[in-house]
Image: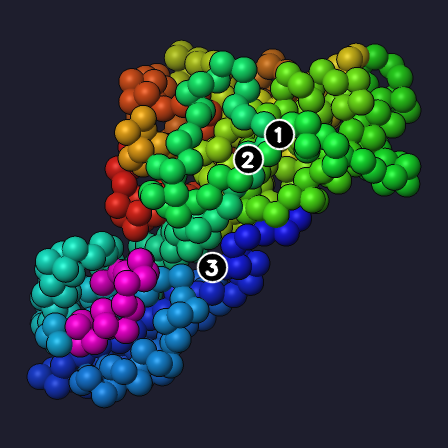
Amino acid sequence: MLTGNQAAISGGSRVGILFVASSLFSEAAAEELIGRTRDLVAEGELAGRFKLAGRLARDRASCAAALESIDLGDLDGLVIQLSTFCTADLLHEVLSAIGERALPLAVWALEESDAIITNSLCGAQLWASTLARFGRRFTLLMGNPGDADLARDLAAFAAAARANTRVRGARVALIGSHADWFTNLAVDPWALKRALGVTIEQMTLVRFLDGCKATAEAEQAAATRWAEASFDGGEAEAGRATLGRTYARLEAGLDAIKADAVALRDWPEILYAEDFRGTWAALGELSERAIPIAPEGDVMGAVSALVARAFDPASLPFLTDISGIDRANNRLVLWHYGVSPRLADGPRSLDPVLKQETFPLRPGPMTLFRLSMRADGSLRIFVAEGAIEDQRSAANRAAGYFRPWAGKAEALVRQFIDEGYEHHVTAVYGHWGDAVAHLGRQLGVKVDHA
């Protein structure tokens, strides 16, 4: 599938790190910090994520050269390390170079707990205050190269900056509309355009289905995706052939769409159409495509999935309902369709009519979040971190027990409901709560932490 967002194609953009200092403080100390920073971002999950300025900025000329060395136009975000205290003359140079672009900014203050060699923290306060007066959003990072917490914060900022780049100006294909009477999923296209620059390109189901034509060879190849699945109706060969046909046809239709994410009205029209039996199981396999798909016509679910893919392109985010609560064991039941079988921790099975594919979700750390739009057009984000447990739930479809790491499961779902969030969250394996918090600051929206 083609995409309308060129930043999502290249995947090569990174976060820049600019080093600023003053002649009033030790240049040797600043250079030593730069060396340690270079070592830090060359290892582990930070490797390849950052582009470091080629020189220390100490005056306007050296600042211009340093900015040129990191090529601001190709960056997702910019971290400014106060390698020593530095007055705001260089900040004016930085802002002039950025221009009107909404580039995520972080001000990095070093930690000095005894002797004050760099006075970095005071310099960061000066820069932060100046940014606030200019109305420019920023994030404060605090810590020294080599600090584990600082490394995690840098990684989270970079992930959020990637998401910010990929969401702004994205195109979401809305095929049909939201599912019948899921009116809470309706999105004002003009409000979304104003808020994020996201364009909703809507097409009818009739037009989409007209493009869902596949060759017999494609259908046969797709059927092998269910080679290891069991069929409760006992007709495995026929079931695989039916699923392969539906998968190949939907894939052909999706291939014709130019978008960064897709929101698809999959039921009732497609799900119950004779030529598309097994739609929900096919959507699970199709969820592994580079362009995320949100079922039920959930536009903001599609945007949230786009965020998750920006955090980690290899992730397999999925839309899910919070469908059950086990208060005695402080956990929730997650339950939905359209989930990649690569996230299964056990056998896959199809019911006799091929409506639902069932498997348990694999255990591991998970983040639940939703980028949501209020009725007035303002944005907000809900986020909660936890884990899918080893114990399997008895629910059909793709299901699992989610235990939140902070607070009570009941408090989480009550907050989600009381705040009026839609009845879907995006689930993605991994620790992404900090990245969501950074994204909220970059977008200037409220983040509700559960």
C-alpha distance separating marks 2 and 1: 7 Å
Could you tell me which secondary element the residue under label 2 belongs to?
strand
Evaluate whether residue 84 shows in this view: no
Left or right: residue 341 versus residue 76 is right
Q: Secondary structure at mark 3?
A: helix
**Is residue 174 in view from this perspective?**
yes
The spot of residue 252 in percent (x, y) is: 75, 40
Find disc 1 in the rendering and name its residue.
204
Query: For the magenta stretch, what is the residue range?
Result: 90-107
Residue 45 tag number: 3
Query: In the image, what residue type sits under mark 2?
Result: Gln
Question: Residue tagged by mark 2?
Answer: 202
The residues bearing labels 3 and 1 have C-alpha atoms spaced at a distance of 42 Å
- Mark 1 or mark 3, which is nearer the start of the sequence? 3
Q: Quadrant of residue 273?
A: top right
Q: Are marks 3 and 2 in contact (CB under 8 Å)?
A: no
Left or right of residue 64: residue 261: right
